[in-house]
Image (tube, grey):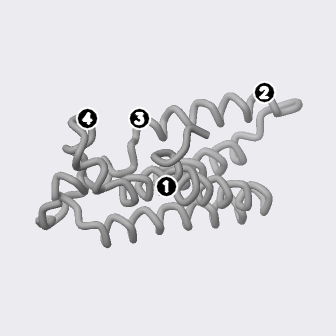
Amino acid sequence: MPDAAAPRWSDFLELTKPRIVALVLVTVGAAFYLGASGSLPWGLLAHTLFGTALVAAGTNGLNQVIEGKVDALMRRTRHRPIPAGRLAVLPAAVFASALGAAGVAWLAVRVNPMAGLLAALTLFSYAFIYTPLKRRTTL
């Protein structure tokens, strides 16, 4: 991968895969609505969506950090910020980790500790179990 020039905010945004985050939020919002009894607690929904967005963005960023070298080899992914040299691995990893940690903390404090724990488990299992194993096994 080439050395990264001064990163732009758009490169950090691209690292988070905003379209995937949006799809996650639609799913979470729908599940929240279906699980609500009585009137919808709009404040709790807003906190849930915000924390989830941070965790999803951080998870997507960590995925790209881990797969940067592989992404450089594939036509579909070689123009992503890390393989294209627009972002160095360390700043990308710090940014993604900070987003994920902030989202876990937000959910734990503003929603409930179980939401924070489940978000942390999701982030960890996706970034550090699924991502490395997907090239090694069909499971």
User: In the image, is residue 43 above or below residue 118?
Assistant: above
Quarter of the rendering occupied by the C terminus: top right
Q: Return the disc, 4 or 3, that comes first in the chain's sequence.
A: 3
* Residue where numbered disc 3 is placed: 19
- How packed is label 3: few (under 14 Cα within 10 Å), some, or many (20 or more)? few
Query: Which secondary structure lies at badge 2?
Result: helix
Disc 4: CA contacts within 10 A as few (<14), some (14-19) or many (>=20): few
Q: Which residue is drawn at 74% across and 30% down?
A: 33
Amino acid type shown at disc 2:
Leu
Find residue 76 and name its label.
4
Mark 1 lies on a secondary structure that is helix
Q: Nearer the viewer, residue 57 or 109?
A: 57
Give SS at disc 4.
loop
Relative depth, front residue between 94 and 128: 128
Q: In which quarter of the image is residue 7?
A: bottom left
Tell me the CA gap for discs 4 and 3.
Answer: 16 Å
- Relative placement, left or right, of 4 versus 54 is left
Inter-mark Cα distance, 1 to 2: 34 Å
Q: Mark 2 points at which residue?
A: 34
Q: In this view, does 122 lie above or below 31?
A: below
